[in-house]
Image (cartoon, grey):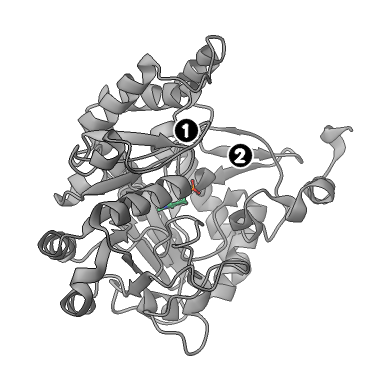
């Protein structure tokens, strides 16, 4: 097969012959309105099989704080492959990786490692249910916690489905058992009254609240002041477990994640993405009291590959690097602010109505059909977004050499590789795309 002469479309057709739908995650199927088949990735640049270079703002959905092909994590993992990367036995790396997580994340003393965010969330929910002896789990509309059976809800699509309410818990995929979500309830993000009412009514039945402490998977909407504190207070008083899903925010919005940024400590924290620098690894953890049922082996969490030595080398390499760079989060804030300014200039120059929400290196960038007054709620944001036009914009931008997710609610991710030069280049390409969009 001569890959050199093939187009993206040809390649994708070939892939589709042997990979159902052409992708190994359903999430990815929606993300390629134009065929794009990657040949390599460096820094924040993708090169496709046609040899086009694209500035990437999707960045593999968030793990690459230091950009693609980071030598430190690559070399560390390669070295581990020469020493045995999977034995299914304890290793000194367990202590090293666990200590680094515990040192950096305020609410964590002990962890268990897992292979993916989905597994770690499912295990944290099970632990919360086992510890409290209760079943009900509370989450928020638009918050994504992976695709396991008791938490996968239809997400962004329901926002645009006539007649759905923010509290409707709709199964996220065909084939889920009808009762899968019977013990999961949903409230609107940032709605203090709704949460207070729920706890007043059902507090004694609630095992856990799980949330993205910044609602990143739909709109990058930060918590309104006092909201996380309210959740902390309600869960402490009712004996429920407060779970922060920091799969995206962990080691990204601050060294210690959103819990450090907002000064609120959960009972359990779920981590993944940045922690492994692109290597598949996740963790869930908390204070020793919260992890007690694992210490005594009363709770169950498995996985042949969970915490394998290569994955933990990736964690040790990434977190050691983060620890050694005291100015890193100021630098990342500078990159985020610079990108936001550059984008605002582009959309203003092209007279386009746009919404930009940013927390550090996480951004929502969405073309609007009407001005947005309330920035704190998902429903208002979703109503104001011009989804079809944003999608057309994405296709044009991709042709001009910039890649971002076509769903306007999906976050944009920045890294230390998004330097001024690259951002200038991206700004030029986005302006051309907007001119074509008209
Ligand atoms: C906040 C959050 N939780 C959980 C997950 C699930 O992680 P994974 O895809 O590794 O299973 C994701 C994935 O994007 C996520 O963003």
Label 1 crowd bin: few (<14), some (14–19), many (20+), radius 10 Å: many
The residue where tag 2 is placed is 46
Tell me the tag on residue 319.
none
SS for dot 2: strand
Q: Position of residue 207 (x, y in %)?
A: 27, 62
At x 18% / y 63%, what residue is drawn? 231
At x 31% / y 75%, what residue is drawn? 188
Callout count? 2
Say whether residue 244 is visible: no
Q: Position of residue 76 (x, y in %)?
A: 47, 17
User: Disc 2 versus disc 1: distance between alpha carbons?
Assistant: 30 Å
SS for dot 1: loop
Residue 380 located left or right of residue 47 = left
The residue where tag 1 is placed is 306
Of 106 and 53, the residue lying toward us: 106
Q: Of tags 2 and 1, which is closer to the observer?
A: 1
């Amino acid at each position: 097969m001569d890959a050199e002469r093939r187009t993206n479309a040809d390649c994708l057709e070939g892939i589709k012959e042997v990979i159902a739908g052409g992708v190994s995650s359903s999430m990815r199927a929606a993300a390629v309105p134009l065929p794009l088949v990657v040949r390599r990735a460096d820094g924040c640049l993708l090169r496709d099989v046609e040899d086009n270079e694209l500035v990437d703002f999707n960045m593999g959905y968030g793990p690459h704080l230091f950009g693609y092909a980071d030598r430190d994590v690559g070399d560390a993992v390669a070295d581990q492959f020469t020493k045995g990367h999977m034995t299914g036995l304890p290793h000194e790396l367990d202590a090293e990786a666990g200590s680094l997580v515990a040192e950096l994340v305020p609410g964590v003393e002990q962890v268990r490692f897992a292979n993916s965010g989905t597994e770690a969330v499912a295990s944290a929910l099970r632990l919360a249910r086992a510890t409290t002896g209760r079943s009900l789990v509370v989450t928020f509309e638009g918050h994504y916690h992976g695709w396991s059976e008791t938490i996968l809800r239809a997400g962004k699509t329901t926002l645009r489905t006539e007649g759905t309410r923010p509290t409707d818990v709709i199964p996220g995929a065909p084939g889920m058992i009808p009762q899968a979500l019977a013990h999961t309830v949903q409230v609107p993000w940032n709605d203090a009254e709704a949460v207070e009412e729920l706890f007043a009514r059902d507090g004694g039945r609630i095992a856990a609240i799980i949330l993205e402490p910044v609602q990143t998977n739909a709109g990058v909407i930060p918590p309104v002041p006092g909201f996380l504190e309210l959740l902390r207070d309600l869960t402490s008083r009712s004996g429920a477990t407060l779970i922060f899903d920091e799969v995206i925010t962990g080691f990204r919005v601050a060294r210690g994640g959103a819990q450090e940024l907002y000064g609120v400590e959960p009972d359990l924290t779920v981590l993944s993405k940045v922690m492994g620098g692109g290597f598949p690894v996740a963790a869930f953890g908390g204070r020793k009291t919260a992890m007690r049922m694992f210490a005594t082996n009363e709770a169950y969490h498995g996985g042949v590959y969970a915490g394998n030595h290569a994955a933990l080398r990736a964690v040790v390499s990434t977190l050691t690097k983060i620890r050694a760079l005291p100015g890193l989060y100021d630098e990342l804030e500078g990159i985020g602010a610079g990108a936001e300014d550059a984008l605002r200039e582009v959309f203003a120059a092209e007279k386009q109505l746009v919404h930009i929400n940013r927390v550090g290196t996480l951004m929502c960038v969405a073309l609007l059909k009407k001005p947005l007054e309330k920035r704190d709620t998902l429903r208002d944001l979703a109503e104001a977004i011009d989804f079809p036009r944003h999608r057309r914009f994405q296709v044009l931008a991709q042709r001009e050499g910039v890649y971002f997710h076509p769903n306007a609610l999906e976050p944009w991710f920045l890294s230390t590789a998004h330097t001024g030069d690259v951002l200038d280049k991206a700004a030029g390409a986005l302006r051309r795309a907007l001119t074509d969009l008209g």
